[in-house]
Amino acid sequence: MLSALASRLPADTVLVEEAPSSRPDLHRLVPARNPLGFVSAAMGGLGFGVPAAVGLRMALPDRPVVAVVGDGAALYGLHALWSATHYRVGALFVVLANGRYAIMDRLADHQGGKAPWPPFTEVDVRGLARSLGCPARRVDSYDELTATLDEVVPDLRAREEPLLLDVNVTVDLGFQP
C-alpha cells in the first residue's frame, strides 16, 4: 500500500504521518524532498494527523497534502474532516484500517503481555467521514488501491474537496512488486 502511494506522489507533497506502526516504511519509501515534505508528531500522542493535514493544506494551498493515518489515531481527530469539507480543503486522507491499535499491541507483545484493550473492528471510518460531510471510499484490493490513486493523486494540487480512503490493511492487497 505504502509503496503504491509513494511511487505516485509529486516531489513537493506534504506527507503527514500518524501511523506509528508504518513509520519506518514511510521513512524508507517517501523521502522528504522539500521543506515540510514529512510531518509527524514527536510526542507520541494520538489525534495529530487529520487536523494537521487540514491546517497544512490551508496554509499551503499550492502544495498537495496527504495524511497517512492509522485508524486508531484517526479516531482522535476525525472530526477535523468537518472543517476540511466546509472550508474546501482538498487534502487526501489515507487511513490504514486494521481495527486496532497496532503499535500499542506490538508494545504490549514486546513486554510479554497481551494488549488489555479490545479491537474496534465494528468502527466504520468511511461512515464516520461521510457523516462529517467528507467523501470517503473503502479500498479492499490492490487493484482498487492503484486505480483510486491513479485517479486522485494527479489532481491533488488543484483538489478542493477532501477525500478519505479507508484502506483495509487486514487483507493481502495482492501487491505486485
Image (cartoon, rainbow, N blue to C red):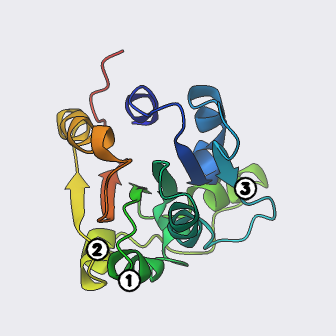
The residue located at (63%, 30%) in the rendering is 31
Image marks 1 and 3: residues in contact by CB distance under 8 Å: no
Crowd tier of the residue under label 3, counting other residues whose Cα lies within 10 Å: few below 14, some 14–19, many 20 or above: few
Foreground mark, 3 or 2? 2
Q: Quadrant of the N terminus?
A: top left
Res 172 quadrant in image: top left
Image spot of residue 152 (x, y percent): 26, 45
What is the x, y in percent for residue 132?
31, 84
Q: Amino acid at mark 1?
A: Trp
Q: Which residue is mark 3?
A: 107
> In what element is the residue under mark 3?
helix
State the separation of the CA atoms marked 3 and 2: 33 Å
Q: Secondary structure at mark 1?
A: helix
Q: Secondary structure at mark 2?
A: loop
Residue placed at 50% from the left, 55% from the top? Answer: 67
Question: For this rendering, which residue is in front, 51 or 76?
Answer: 51
Viewer-proximal residue, 32 or 131?
32
Above-or-below relation of 159 to 131: above
Residue 90 point in image, percent of width and height:
36, 61
Q: Which residue is mark 2?
A: 134
Image-based side of 41 in relation to 98, left or right: right
CA gap between label 1 and label 2 equals 7 Å
Give the residue type that dot 3 points to. Leu
Q: Earlier in the sequence, mark 1 or mark 3?
A: 1
- Label of residue 82 in the image: 1
Dot 3 or dot 2: first in sequence order is: 3
Please state if 52 lies on the left or on the right of 85 as rendered: right
Q: Quadrant of the C terminus?
A: top left
Displayed quadrant of residue 153: top left
Check disc 1: other Cα within 10 Å, few if <14, some if 14-19, many if 20+: some
